Image (cartoon, rainbow, N blue to C red):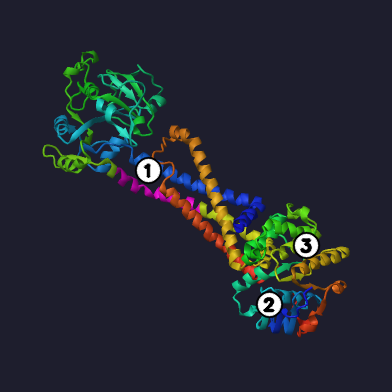
Amino acid sequence: MNSSSSPVISLRHVEFQYANSTQKTLSIPSFDVNAGEELFLFGASGSGKSTLLEILAGVLTPQSGEVKVLDKNLTKMSSTERDHFRAAHIGYVFQSFNLIPYLSVYENIELPLHLSPERRARLKGQKSKDAIEHLCNELGIQELINKRVTELSVGQQQRVAVARALLGRPEIILADEPTSALDHDHREKFIRLLFQVCEEMNTSVVFVSHDRTLEKLFTRSVSVQSINHVDSSSARLS
Amino acid sequence: MIFLRLAFLSIRNRLFTTFLTVISIALSVALLLSVERTRRATEEGFTQAISQTDLIVGARSGPVNLILYTIFNMGSATNNISWKTYEDLKKNPAVEWTIPYSLGDGHHGFRVVATDENFYEHYRFRGNGQVEFAEGKPALGIWDVVLGSEVAKKLHYQLGQKVVIAHGVTHGEGVLLHSDKPFTVSGILKPTGTALDTSLYISLYGMEAVHMDWKNGAAPTKETEIPQDKIKKEDIHIGQITAFFLRTKSRILTLSLQRQINDYQQEPLLAIIPGVTLADLWRSLGYIEQALKMISWMVVAVGLMAMLIALLTGLNERRREMAILRSIGAGPSRITALMVFESFLLTVIGIGCGVGLELSGFFLLRGWLENTFGLYLVGEVFAGREIFYLSITLIAGILIGLIPALRASRLALKDGLSVRT
């Protein structure tokens, strides 16, 4: 694990409010994620954790404050620049339905390479087929590579999603409750596998969940309520 | 490249709606093309009812009247041309050939045309279509008659059969029949899809011969009647004809010759350029064409609407897909492009199927259309106008595709990475 403490993500005075809402969803004075860190971000539903994740991904922009990811200020970028930035540096894993149903497993994993020349460059001349096979081997899904997405179990789908998120070594993985569709035994196994690959690639992980039984696996655990100074009981459900 | 594949796989994934969308576009395109082809065939059949004839000359009346009674068997001449005038104009150095036409008699509602060997040799329609015989030979003898294909078919006439023509009647049953001087069928023409099919052809001598014993438009009495077997070709004197067709030696002589004939001192004549008059006449019938065209464009619009509906209704279930694409860095413009490309693909496939459908239908039904409706297609199978129509359809398809595409990207922006309802 990387011991460097320079933050890969740094939020200052971030205020966010949905256009159709009368209340702020987020008000975060300060929040940092360090390089190589595996951060567990927990909170009840409605605490604003999904909103925070979308701000980190550059899909949402706060009304005020500074969102620095890899020393780039996302709030200063155009939406197209943020899309490119996300494609190049961030892997995203959803709770479920991560995959495009009419593409094969292989094509799903390969998608980010088509959207980001940076990710392709980071394969360092390795053929994308070899890189994908290598990643799938590590995640134990090498037999699934040519299968149809619809033939996969939920657990298998989540591992394919991780493979896609990690292909081309993005610096950050954002995971929005990726284990909530898995049963308890598989959750821990999934997370250990995720960490194993991320540590190898020196990728930082921000993992959002409401299930605190997983907390112990992470290097650091933060409650959304502790960084978000909005009264969560009145915050918009999202 | 992956986006081409994404769009392609995505429409394949929704096979049933894709199929319906493609079918609706294909059918509407096929209809549009069929209407256009029929229109063109009709127009060509009409404006090329006669070809390679530079001038039609008749007694002075109106151009439309002249073309109607010479080409379409409709109406009648107001006056005749004297044989002397015809002989005189025929000798004009600018003239290559002439076809004399003498009208006035009929047979069971079909028109009898008296002409000479030039008709069989020079008469052309639809470009280079010429008078051909299904059986028999031209009516060159005094009592020979050649039947148009339709006449032979309707009346069940055979070669060698006796045919009695009626005096002065071109519609319905004749009252005054030339029953004392029957003609013998010497030939039957092949179908042409023109008015030739509904005419009977005799020689100019024949026309004179049946009227030889008539005096001032009155039928002969028993005493004045000349028996058929007494009539010799040498005794027949041709006094007048109704009209004649004319070919100039060089097309540039046409206009000056036309002026010359129209200014002819000895007799009031009218010379018209058939192509010009036919085109004028066709234009006056243009509203039918416009109506047909409008209807087929409306059908195309309905076909494209079906695509719009299919894409819009499919949009909601695809929001997840859009969120996934957003998460890996696809911007809203990428999503718009993807959706527009899908409409483009659907329209292209639809147009392709439509063209295939129309062409195969056309080639399969061609013989039947020619035989049943006399609808002949000349010229190219696929004209520039069709390409133009298909381009308009394609552009319309892409523009209509913008509607679901923009909606998709708006939804994608609103949804972000989670599907909000």
Main secondary-structure element of the magenta-colored stretch = helix
Residue visible at 69% across and 81% down in the picture: A16
- Where residue A220 sits in the image (x, y, percent)? 82, 77
Image-based side of A222 in relation to B10, left or right:
right
Circle 3 residues within 10 Å: few <14, some 14–19, many ≥20: many
Vertically, is B182 above or below B97? above
Query: Tag 2, which chain?
Result: A
Image-based side of B17 in relation to B347, left or right:
right
Q: Which residue is tagged 1?
A: B43
Task: For mark 1, give the secondary structure.
Answer: helix
Classify the position of the N terminus of chain B by image quarter: bottom right
Q: Are marks 1 and 3 in contact (CB under 8 Å)?
A: no
Amino acid type, label 2:
Val
Amino acid type, label 3:
Gln
- Where residue B350 sits in the image (x, y, percent)? 55, 50
Query: Tag 3, which chain?
Result: A
- Please tell me which residue lies in front, A134 or B332: A134
Q: Calculate the distance from the C-alpha at mark 2 to the C-alpha at mark 3.
A: 25 Å
Q: Which residue is tagged 3?
A: A158
The residues colored magenta run: B277-298
Q: Which residue is tagged 2?
A: A69
